[in-house]
Image: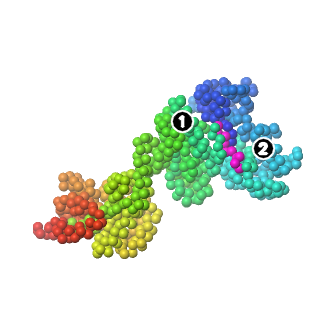
């Protein structure tokens, strides 16, 4: 379908095969003063008159090409006025034809182009103060208005220079720059700053102006390609990007894609909200974020990254109704306002078509780029928020989609909103706690249940919140799981643990400390350099006094890459354990491919093993696997000596749990170690006890 300029008030309409208006752009009411609801589902001949009474809607639908027609458009007050109408036949599912059309107000650039091309006077209200011209596809100026001629100091009765004085090159060879042509092909227009060259007019040389260049198709007699309608704005602040009814605000277009800016989106959204409440109609707001676009952009470069943004913007525009609005907040995000939806049940299908359009492979030169998208949707008037709230709700749903793994669609609901609000609040609070040093570590001993010897301490985080008091991890970790705050907290905990090893060493206590590390931090590019840097800041800490426990409940996206990372960590001398084994993702694959030293049997299997034969069977299986893969095995959740005895008899020689000691603050550890060595370890020396029984 041809590309048409949309600088000035434009109304899109659709007519079914029976001649009834079935769709009408929101600008209709601004152009005519007639409510859209009045015109919808009425015959087109009630509002439009053609010069030739015989050339009716039926003739429009039978045409095989797009046509430009002079028509009279009825207004609510005053006489009907001449406007330009572009009509294009549209095939319906039953094989019959209706029409898709656009009505351009009399000052629209299509009208100006046609009148200038035919030597007409043009629309003087528009033309008298702005230099305007038409230009062929090869850069030749075809027609100029008087303002253009005056500006370039043409002699009376003559045209100004035949080649545009704002493109590089000599006067007889200046052509449209390749970069501008590329944008024109992708977007249908280009708006940007140009400097005028001295083509015999030194008084204009170096002048800085805004050029608005539009592709105009659908005209006969222009073999070889489209031609362009251009406007020069001497004062850049005068340069309009569109004329969208009551949303005529400066800088209304995204400079890369030409999509409406936030002001236009907000204006149209507010109108749509009002319309939906007044007419019980349905609308939706869709928030899109392209997954991993930063990595793609870094790999292929900014220019080709911009090409991807342009292609996605064009794909999205092409599958939507003209009454829908697409906005680009920036980067790789898009916001879409969907109007005139027949039922809520239609929305998932519409949004899925948008997603499918975005994720189709993109060919750039010799490369094929595959992208994915996380999409959030909110539906109004079910979501009764104002425009800002709807945008925020759609954004929150998009974030939820991304947190679920991306490449999916999530719908906003109030419960989801409450959860996200709580998460956002908790993330801010945790960040504040890190800055204010409110987090402390408690330590739970790990022992050999063969000899009773203390072999290490596991660091467990606690939060001393000034507002909420002393908090266990279950009160705050679930709210930040999967966010960048978790990584910040893991780094903070590792730093606290290293400082504690130093402090105990000064007291003569040599006990290794193990720290839980989430998969997100483990998969970050700076993980190994971070470990090296932190160890270098604590030179008195031997690397083998530190053990990192990798949570097996976290999904690893790149197990080969993580395996290489862990190998680098182990080469530094740092110990590695696979925590919560048996409760998470691909346990056998992790066991085989991750170079860890120790397996930790999750407490959920250990706790009930004395009463539940199935838990005991699982423990036997994990112990066998640890032996087969040459791993040390330690059991969590050892609550009684009987647990320790049974585990020892089955081949598990290490344990931790409440039966040994509860987590304790660092200052209590020295006294506990003394008491344990003097008496309490006696009942946990199962190797000695077993020998005595024999």
In what quadrant of the picture does the N terminus appear? Answer: top right
Residue at the outermost left position: 693
Give the residue drawn at x 47%, y 38%: 383
Q: Secondary structure at mark 2?
A: loop
Is 432 or 93 nearer to us in this picture? 432
The secondary structure that dominates the magenta segment is: loop
Q: Residue 583's x, y, as percent? A: 31, 54
Q: Secondary structure at mark 1?
A: helix
Q: How is the image coloured?
A: rainbow
Judging by the rendered image, the residue that carries numbered circle 2 is 129
Q: Is residue 410 left or right of residue 299?
A: left
Is 311 or 271 nearer to us in this picture? 271
Q: Where, by quadrant of the figure, is residue 335 drawn?
A: top right
Against 277, is 371 above or below?
below
* Residue 240 among magenta residues: yes
Binning the other alpha carbons within 10 Å of mark 2 as few (below 14), some (14 to 19) or many (20 upward) gives some
């Amino acid at each position: 379908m041809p590309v048409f300029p949309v600088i000035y008030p434009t109304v899109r309409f659709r007519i079914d095969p029976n001649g009834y208006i079935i769709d009408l752009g929101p600008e209709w009411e601004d152009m005519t003063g007639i409510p859209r609801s009045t015109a919808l589902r009425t015959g087109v001949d009630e509002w439009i008159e053609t010069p030739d009474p015989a050339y009716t809607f039926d003739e429009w639908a039978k045409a095989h090409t797009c046509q430009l027609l002079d028509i009279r458009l009825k207004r609510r007050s005053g006489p009907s006025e001449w406007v330009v109408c572009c009509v294009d036949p549209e095939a319906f599912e039953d094989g019959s034809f209706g029409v898709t059309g656009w009505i351009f107000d009399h000052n629209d650039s299509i009208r100006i182009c046609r009148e200038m091309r035919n030597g007409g006077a043009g629309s003087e209200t528009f033309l008298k103060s702005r230099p305007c011209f038409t230009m062929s596809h090869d850069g030749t100026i075809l027609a100029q208005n008087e303002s253009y001629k005056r500006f370039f100091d043409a002699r009376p009765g003559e045209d100004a220079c035949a080649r545009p004085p704002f493109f590089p090159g000599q006067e007889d060879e200046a052509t449209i720059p390749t970069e501008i042509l590329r944008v024109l092909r992708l977007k249908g227009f280009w708006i940007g700053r140009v400097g005028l060259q001295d083509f015999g007019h030194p008084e204009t040389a170096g002048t800085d102006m805004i050029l608005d260049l539009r592709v105009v198709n659908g005209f006969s007699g222009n073999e070889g390609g489209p031609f362009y309608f251009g406007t020069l704005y001497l004062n850049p602040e005068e340069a309009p990007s569109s004329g969208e009814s009551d949303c005529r605000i400066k800088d209304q277009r995204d400079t890369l894609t030409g999509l409406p800016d936030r002001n236009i989106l907000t204006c149209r959204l507010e109108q749509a909200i009002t319309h939906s409440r007044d007419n019980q109609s349905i609308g939706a707001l869709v928030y899109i974020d392209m997954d991993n676009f930063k990595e793609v952009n870094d790999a292929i470069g900014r220019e080709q990254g911009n090409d991807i943004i342009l292609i996605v913007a064009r794909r999205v525009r092409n599958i939507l109704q003209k009454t829908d609005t697409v906005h680009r907040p920036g980067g790789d995000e898009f916001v879409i306002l969907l109007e005139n939806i027949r039922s809520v049940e239609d929305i998932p299908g519409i949004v899925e078509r948008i997603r499918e359009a975005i994720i189709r492979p993109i060919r750039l030169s010799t490369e094929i780029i595959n992208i994915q998208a996380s999409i959030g949707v909110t539906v109004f008037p079910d979501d009764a928020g104002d425009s800002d709230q709807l945008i925020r709700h759609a954004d929150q749903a998009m974030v939820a989609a991304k947190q679920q793994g991306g490449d999916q669609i999530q719908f906003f609901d109030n419960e989801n909103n409450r959860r996200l609000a709580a998460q956002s609040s908790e993330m801010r609070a945790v960040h504040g706690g890190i800055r204010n040093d409110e987090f402390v570590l408690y330590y739970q001993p790990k022992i050999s249940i063969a000899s009773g010897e203390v072999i290490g301490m596991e660091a467990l985080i606690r939060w001393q919140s000034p507002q909420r008091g002393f908090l266990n991890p279950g009160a705050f970790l679930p709210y930040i799981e999967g966010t960048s705050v978790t990584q910040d907290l893991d780094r903070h905990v590792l730093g606290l643990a290293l400082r504690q090893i130093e402090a105990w060493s000064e007291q003569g206590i040599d006990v290794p400390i193990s720290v839980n590390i989430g998969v997100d931090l483990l998969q970050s590019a700076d993980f190994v350099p971070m470990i090296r840097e932190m160890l270098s800041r604590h030179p008195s800490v031997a690397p083998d006094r530190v053990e990192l426990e990798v949570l097996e409940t976290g999904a690893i996206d790149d197990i080969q890459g993580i395996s290489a990372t862990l190998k680098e960590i182990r080469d530094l001398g740092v110990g590695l354990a696979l925590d919560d084994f048996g409760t998470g993702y691909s346990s056998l694959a992790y066991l085989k491919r991750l170079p860890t030293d120790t397996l930790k049997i999750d407490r959920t299997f250990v706790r009930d093993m004395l009463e539940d034969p199935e838990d005991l069977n699982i423990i036997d299986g994990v112990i066998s696997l640890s032996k087969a893969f040459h791993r040390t095995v330690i059991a969590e959740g050892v609550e009684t000596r009987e647990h320790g005895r049974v585990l020892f008899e089955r081949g598990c020689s290490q344990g931790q749990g409440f039966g040994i000691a509860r987590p304790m603050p660092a200052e209590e550890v020295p006294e506990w170690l003394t008491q344990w060595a003097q008496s309490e370890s006696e009942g946990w020396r199962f190797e000695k006890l077993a020998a005595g029984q024999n």
